[in-house]
Image (cartoon, rainbow, N blue to C red):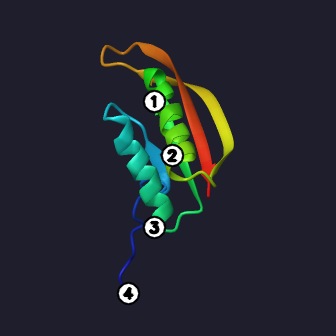
Amino acid sequence: MEEQTEQPKTEMPRRRDDNTVFVGKKGTMGYVLAVVTQFNNGAKEVVVKARGKLISRAVDVVEIVRHRFMPDSKVDEIKISTEELTSEDGSINKVSSIEIKIQK
């Protein structure tokens, strides 16, 4: 009888939520299009996330979606927090972040 050795357990990679739009340095309308596309693909809610200086762009994205493209949508929940990021030189920086949940 062959002896079975137990394999070390590896963590499953964290799965990105399909209905999340991460706001970065691209143009605002690109993120607006991403949110509207999520809704057109059947999503009932979409979360827009941003950190630091890009928080204002995330707010702009949500407001453009609500007022121009989907006037029947509403902001369901807003979460704010502070994240600690380690820079390349090893120092820890605190960065504000926001999550805005929009519902159809």
User: Where's residue 58, x and y in %?
Assistant: 49, 34
- Up the image or down, 81 lies above or below 46; here it is above
* Eye-nearest disc, 3 or 4: 3
- The kind of secondary structure element at disc 4 is loop
Q: Residue at x 65, y 35 (%)?
A: 79
Could you say whether the residue bearing mark 3 is in a helix, strand or loop? Answer: loop
| Residue 93, above or below 34 | above
User: Reading the chain from its start, which is encountered first: label 3 or label 4?
Assistant: 4
Q: How many marks?
A: 4
| Contact between labelled residues 1 and 4, with CB atoms less than 8 Å apart | no
Q: Where, quadrant-wise, is the C terminus in this rendering?
A: bottom right
| Whole-number angstrom distance, CA of label 4 to CA of label 1 | 63 Å
> Mark 2 falls on what kind of element?
helix
Quarter-of-image position of residue 67 = top right
Q: Amino acid at mark 3?
A: Asn
Horizontal relation, residue 97 to residue 86: left or right: right
Residue 69 x %, y %: 50, 51
Q: Amino acid at mark 4?
A: Met
Name the amino acid, label 1: Arg
Q: CA gap, disc 3 to disc 2? A: 19 Å
Question: Which circle marks residue 1 in the picture?
Answer: 4
Res 21 seen here? yes
- Of the two numbered discs 3 and 2 in the rendering, the one whose residue sits closer to the viewer: 2
Pointer 3: what residue? Answer: 41
Residue underneath mark 1: 57
Question: Distance between the Cα atoms at labels 2 and 4?
Answer: 69 Å
Q: Nearer the viewer, mark 2 or mark 1?
A: 2
Q: Dot 2: few (<14), some (14–19), or many (≥20) neighbours within 10 Å? A: few
In the image, what residue type sits under mark 2? Arg
Q: Which residue is mark 2?
A: 68
Question: Which residue appears at 45% of the width and 67% of the height?
Answer: 41
